[in-house]
Amino acid sequence: VDHSLMKRAEANDPLALMSVGGRLRFRSGDYATAIEYWEKAASLGDIESHFHLSCMYEEERGVEKDTRKYIHHAEQAAIGGHPIARQNLAAWELKKENLKRAAKHTIIAANLGDDKAIQALKVFYAGGL
């Protein structure tokens, strides 16, 4: 473990907390500890940590599936400019057959430069949205 990275994490540096959680804990399969680090970083405003937490709650990695928490963390990441979180929200809205809201999420993700969102928009527009 990089000593300076751990020192920064101990000082509550959100980027260091996200890195320790993701790079070191998650990759080693220690999901519970990764979640602890990401929760701390997310509470300090780290968008990437919110995104990772949304994935954990959606995929039941280290936690029980929790749709409310999944949506909360995905929304926080999306609001912060995370294009994949925005696309995940679009997919969620599609499941609920809320096409206009899904299209809005997809437009925002495309504006953030997400190539998959741009391709999805072609489908939306071909379908008449």
Image (spheres, helix red, strand yellow):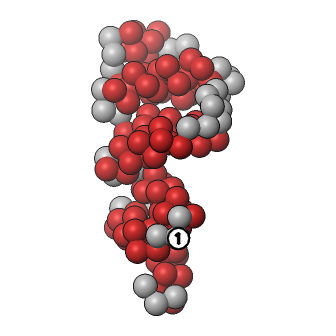
Residue count near mark 1 (Cα–Cα under 10 Å), binned few <14, some 14–19, many ≥20:
few
Q: Is residue 101 above or below residue 46?
A: below
Q: Is residue 28 above or below residue 119?
A: above
Residue furthest to the right: 29
Whether residue 119 is visible here, answered yes or no, is yes
Q: Residue at x 49, y 63 (%)?
A: 93
Q: In the rendering, at what x and y percent does residue 61 appear?
A: 65, 32
Is 58 on the left-hand or right-hand side of 82? right
Whether residue 51 is visible here, answered yes or no, is no
Location of residue 102 by image quarter? bottom left
Q: Is residue 67 above or below residue 104?
A: above
State the SS at label 1: loop
Q: Is residue 1 above or below residue 53?
A: above
Q: Residue at x 53, y 43 (%)?
A: 67
Task: Give the position of the N terminus as an image quadrant.
Answer: top right
Q: In the rendering, at what x and y percent does residue 39 appear?
A: 43, 25
Q: Residue at x 53, y 24 (%)?
A: 35
Location of residue 16 by image quarter? top left
Q: Nearer the viewer, residue 37 or 2?
A: 37
Q: Residue at x 52, y 88 (%)?
A: 127
Q: In the rendering, at what x and y percent does residue 3 appear?
A: 47, 9
Task: Give the position of the C terminus as an image quadrant.
Answer: bottom left
Q: Nearer the viewer, residue 98 or 25?
A: 98
- The amino acid marked with disc number 1 is Glu
Q: How many marks?
A: 1
Q: Which residue is mark 1?
A: 97
Is 21 on the left-hand or right-hand side of 107? right
Q: In the rendering, at what x and y percent does residue 77 appear?
A: 38, 45
